[in-house]
Image (spheres, grey):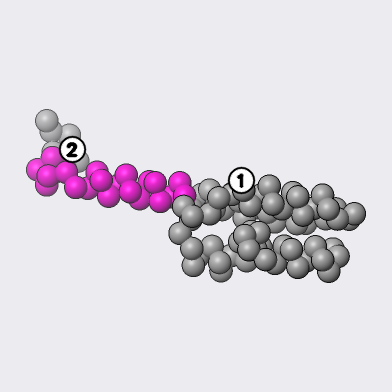
């Protein structure tokens, strides 16, 4: 990996893919994976050397970000389901109508 390539990858927004700490500090809904991956592809096309480790790390990070988004959706759905009246929750668990 060339020094120029390393500088570009270490800068925002692409650095989100290579530094998991930045993901934890941000709201996952603010991370636009498609845009970030397009920037990464542009950076990789500019360099003569192709490093599959970078692509692999980007793929792994992207899948983790998508997983975090799905988990948040399920958490919101669970929270909405728990807001049913208490009687409905008890009847649903016991199988009564």
Q: Residue at the right extreme?
A: 48
Query: From where the camera sits, is residue 56 visible?
Result: no
Disc 1 vs disc 2: which is toward the camera? 1
Within-10-Å neighbours for mark 2: few <14, some 14–19, many 20+: few
Please, what secondary structure does the residue beneath circle 1 have? helix
Q: Could you tell whether 45 is left or right of 68 in the image?
A: right
Q: Quadrant of the C terminus?
A: top left
Which mark identifies residue 34?
Answer: 1
Residue 46 image position (x, y, % from top left): 83, 53
Magenta stretch secondary structure, dominant:
helix
Q: Could you tell whether 95 is left or right of 65 in the image?
A: left
- CA separation in Å, label 1 and label 2: 41 Å
Residue 47 image position (x, y, % from top left): 86, 55
- Where does label 2 land, which residue? 92
Q: Quadrant of the N terminus?
A: bottom right
The stretch drawn in magenta includes residue 74: yes
Please, what secondary structure does the residue beneath circle 2 have? helix
Residue at (77% x, 54% y) in the render: 43
Residue at (53% x, 54% y) in the render: 31
Q: How many marks?
A: 2
Q: Could you tell whether 17 is left or right of 83 in the image?
A: right
Residue at (62% x, 60% y) in the render: 13
The boundaries of the magenta stretch are: 69-90
Q: Residue at the left extreme?
A: 87
Please name whichever residue, 67 or 32, is drawn nearer the observer in this view of the structure.
32
């Amino acid at each position: 990996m060339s020094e120029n390539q390393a500088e570009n990858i270490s800068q925002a927004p692409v650095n989100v893919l290579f530094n998991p700490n930045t993901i934890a500090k941000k709201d996952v809904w603010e991370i636009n994976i498609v845009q970030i991956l397009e920037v990464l592809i542009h950076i990789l096309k500019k360099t003569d050397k192709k490093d599959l480790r970078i692509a692999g790390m980007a793929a792994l990070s992207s899948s983790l970000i998508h997983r975090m988004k799905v988990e948040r959706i399920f958490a919101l759905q669970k929270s909405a389901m728990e807001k049913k009246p208490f009687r409905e929750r008890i009847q649903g668990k016991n199988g009564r109508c």
